[in-house]
Image (cartoon, rainbow, N blue to C red):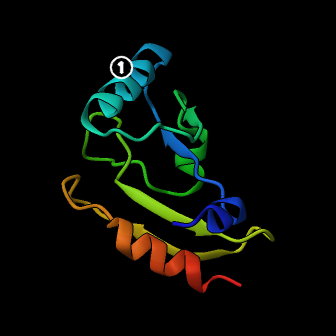
Amino acid sequence: MTEKEKKKFQILAVSIDTHEQSKRFVKDLREKFPAEVDFPLLEDRNHKVIDRFGILNPDGPGWPHPATYVIDKEGVVRWRFVEVNYRNRASNEQILQVLRAVP
């Protein structure tokens, strides 16, 4: 993604993790990938945001289904990827293709 494209979008991660778990997650990411984690992590312990999007896994231990949303500046969901299998995630290529198509 170019610097110009980065200015057009905002990335936000949402999880049910505690603050300590989020810090560990960022530390693990920094160890695995050389790039800086430059997006905010929302700690949604009471899963209000997760419930609003309807992605809480009712069969799991309170974890949400893996999901990626592209929401435009007007708040319209332009694309979503929700998966029951936690191992399946939207690819960076898929997400970038969708972002580039948003006006």
Q: Which of 101 and 62 lies nearest the eye of the viewer?
A: 101
Q: Which of 23 and 55 lies nearest the eye of the viewer?
A: 23
Query: Residue 85: image x %, image y %?
Result: 20, 58
Q: Residue at x 25, y 41 (%)?
A: 60
Query: Residue 18: image x %, image y %?
Result: 46, 19
Residue underneath mark 1: 24
From this viewpoint, which residue is outermost toward the top? Answer: 20
Query: Residue 8: image x %, image y %?
Result: 71, 66
Instruction: Check the image and report above or below for 9 versus 14.
Output: below
* Mark 1 neighbour class, 10 Å CA radius: few under 14, some 14 to 19, many 20 or more: few
Instruction: Check the image and report above or below for 63 versus 80.
Output: above
User: Which image quarter: residue 91?
Assistant: bottom left
Amino acid type at mark 1: Arg
- Give the secondary structure at mark 1: helix
Instruction: Check the image and report above or below for 78 versus 42.
Output: below
Q: Residue at x 81, y 71 (%)?
A: 74
- Image quarter where the C terminus lies is bottom right
Instruction: Check the image and report above or below for 38 versus 100.
Output: above
User: Which image quarter: residue 55?
Assistant: bottom left
Q: Residue at x 56, y 75 (%)?
A: 99
Figure disc tally: 1
Q: Is residue 66 left or right of residue 77?
A: left
Q: Which of 100 and 74 lies nearest the eye of the viewer?
A: 100
